[in-house]
Amino acid sequence: VKAPALAQLAPVLEAGCDRLADLIARTETRLEEVARSHGDVLGRFAGETLGAGGKRLRPMLVYICAGDEDSEMLVRAGAAVELLHMATLVHDDVLDGAALRRGRPTVFAEGGREAATAVGDFLFSRAFAELASTGSAEAVRILSSASTALARGELMQREDAWSTEVTVERYLERCELKTARLFEAACRLGAEHLGPFGNRIGVAFQIFDDVLDVSGPPERTGKPRGADLVDGTVTLPLILARERDPDLAALDLSSTVDRRPSTEEICDRIAATGALDDARDRALAFVAEAKELLSELELGERQRRTLELVADGVVERYA
Ligand code: IPE
Ligand code: IPE
Ligand code: MG
Ligand code: MG
């Protein structure tokens, strides 16, 4: 999982030159320090989680948006965003009952609910401590508002579990809360005026994640195919497919697995309706909107090119 993730962001790193590579390397060092800072058990779980090969896309956004800056404060901001991201994933895996992430067992699978809750809490608290250490109250406000949105998004997802009533609008609102606000915050920490750009690519990113959940393959995503179907998360591919395939619409997905078609079969049926292509198109429309926003801003040439590569990358990504 690690190699393709890096290969996929290689054009971004290349466009960002030594400065970006150096900032990411400093972020890794900082994340290791933070993981080790509070005892062995937290250190082991947090260290494994942080070291499991995430793409570091959100810190990259902080750095690219910040232009030429390369201060220690900036690294703290990038590390804080990644810590918050990891905290939400560790808790998300508890909520989703997920066994795999990044191709490895989740903290939930390995240590159980209690350990995963504590590790997530630890990562949350460290995220804010990291930002507080920069002395910027505004930075703390930006990240806490994203964190609040995330919590609302996760709750909304639980509320909508198994529902056949979820509209595209409601789905997009959830993407906004659960994913786009953190992308927006990452960009704003780099440069306030790039927030809306981050928001659009965040929505695109979540839509594409939901497409990958149905399309797989697991070797590409590091997660089992159809995980969202199994935990009741109603995503855009399913919403669109139900509009087209009445049998699929009539299927009670919450009934026990042996009383309905297999998850693989349901994924294939969703794909057969063309819903994956249409969902991908919706994601691409958000990418286009993001790039449109860039064209209206005054940016350095390298910065513009790098942000465009990130925008294109979010719908071609390897999880
Ligand atoms: C996964 O995010 C969670 C979503 C918002 C879909 P990433 O795909 O950025 O996770 P890592 O950090 O690279 O594993
Ligand atoms: C992203 O949603 C999780 C958060 C934004 C907290 P998903 O539930 O789709 O993410 P994965 O698929 O588990 O990575
Ligand atoms: Mg999940
Ligand atoms: Mg997902």
Image: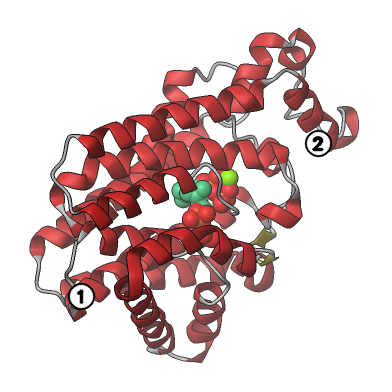
Cα distance between the residues tagged 2 and 1: 47 Å
Instruction: Using the rendered view, name the quadrant where residue 127 is placed.
Output: bottom left
Kindly identify the residue that appears in the image at 74 percent across and 11 percent down. Answer: 245
Residue 305: x and y in percent read: 32, 51
Horizontal side of residue 107 vs 122, given as left or right: right
Horizontal side of residue 313 vs 272, given as left or right: left
Instruction: Using the rendered view, name the quadrant where residue 196 is placed.
Output: top left
Dot 1 falls on a residue whose secondary structure is: loop
Instruction: Using the rendered view, name the quadrant where residue 135 is placed.
Output: bottom left
In the rendered image, which residue does mark 1 sit on?
70
Residue 41: x and y in percent read: 53, 86
Dot 2 falls on a residue whose secondary structure is: helix
In the rendered image, which residue does mark 2 sit on?
263
Quadrant housing the C terminus: bottom right
Nearer to us in this view, 233 or 211: 211
Q: Are marks 2 and 1 in contact (CB under 8 Å)?
A: no
Kindly identify the residue that appears in the image at 38 percent across and 88 percent down. Answer: 33
Q: Residue furthest front?
A: 301
Q: Is residue 230 above or below residue 248?
A: below
Look at label 1 and name its amino acid. Asp
Colouring of the image: secondary structure
Residue 266: x and y in percent read: 79, 29
